[in-house]
Image (cartoon, rainbow, N blue to C red):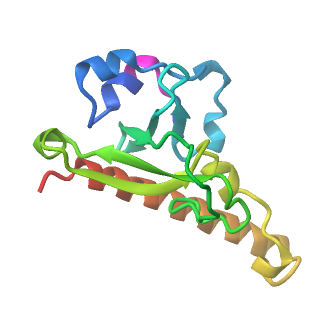
Amino acid sequence: MNPLTEKQLRDSLVNATRSERQRLLPPDLAEVRWDRLEYLGWRDRKQPLAAYVVTWVDDTPVGVLLRSNDGTGRRRAAMCAWCEDVVATNDVQLYVAKRGGAAGRNGDTIGTLICSEFHCSRNARRRPTFAEAGSDDEGVRAAIIERRVDSLRDRVRRFLDEVRRTA
């Protein structure tokens, strides 16, 4: 993923109001390992129920403001809809995004299960188990990781496209 500036992060949010963009508290961008990400996702430290996801779509950064529940409910094992990791299933929660434009202003939302701390890129790059790969062949394992990363990138973009869809 290409690096982003704080201004690009704020400008990329397709479903946020001007005041929501101004309240955005970005992560430390100097610490981000851009080459290991398909998207940048973070929880807002000052707004515990707010989170953000930004990625590049056709050479343009596209981001969404997400909302989570308060986390006080009973947790259940679930699979992240983005990374589909079968190992990290206890750290997944529902995130909801207003749709962009008039649909979002009218209350239309879309939700999905995502890794709570947005570790999908790390999960996609996890070394496949023998059961997943069927062999110890490094080429097979590398192909599995490449397929996971491509699939993650595709699922994130499809979610962002769905948030941007107005009809």
Which residue is painted at 63% across and 19% down in the image?
A: 30
Please check the rendered image and state whether residue 5 is part of the magenta-colored stretch, yes or no.
yes
Question: In the visual, does 113 lie left or right of 162?
Answer: right
Locate residue 125, reporting x and y percent.
71, 56
Locate residue 78, reporting x and y percent.
60, 64
Placement of 141 over or under 105, stated as above or below: below
Quadrant for the N terminus in the image: top right
Question: In the visual, does 95 lie left or right of 3?
Answer: left
Furthest residue toward bottom: 134
Which of the 4 image quarters holds residue 56? Answer: top left
Quadrant for the C terminus in the image: bottom left
In the image, the segment drawn in magenta is 4-8
Which residue is painted at 51% across and 26% down in the image?
A: 44
Which residue is painted at 51% across and 35% down in the image?
A: 2
Which of the 4 image quarters holds residue 134? Answer: bottom right
Placement of 28 over or under 162, stated as above or below: above
Locate residue 21, reporting x and y percent.
33, 21
Placement of 153 over or under 128, stated as above or below: above
Question: In the visual, does 123 lie left or right of 154?
Answer: right
Which residue is painted at 66% across and 33% down in the image?
A: 33
Furthest residue toward right: 136
Prevailing secondary structure of the magenta residues:
helix
Question: In the visual, does 140 lie left or right of 62?
Answer: right
Placement of 112 over or under 58, stated as above or below: below
Count the labels in the image: 0
Depth order, front residue of 94/4: 94
Locate residue 163, reporting x and y percent.
28, 50
Depth order, front residue of 70/143: 70
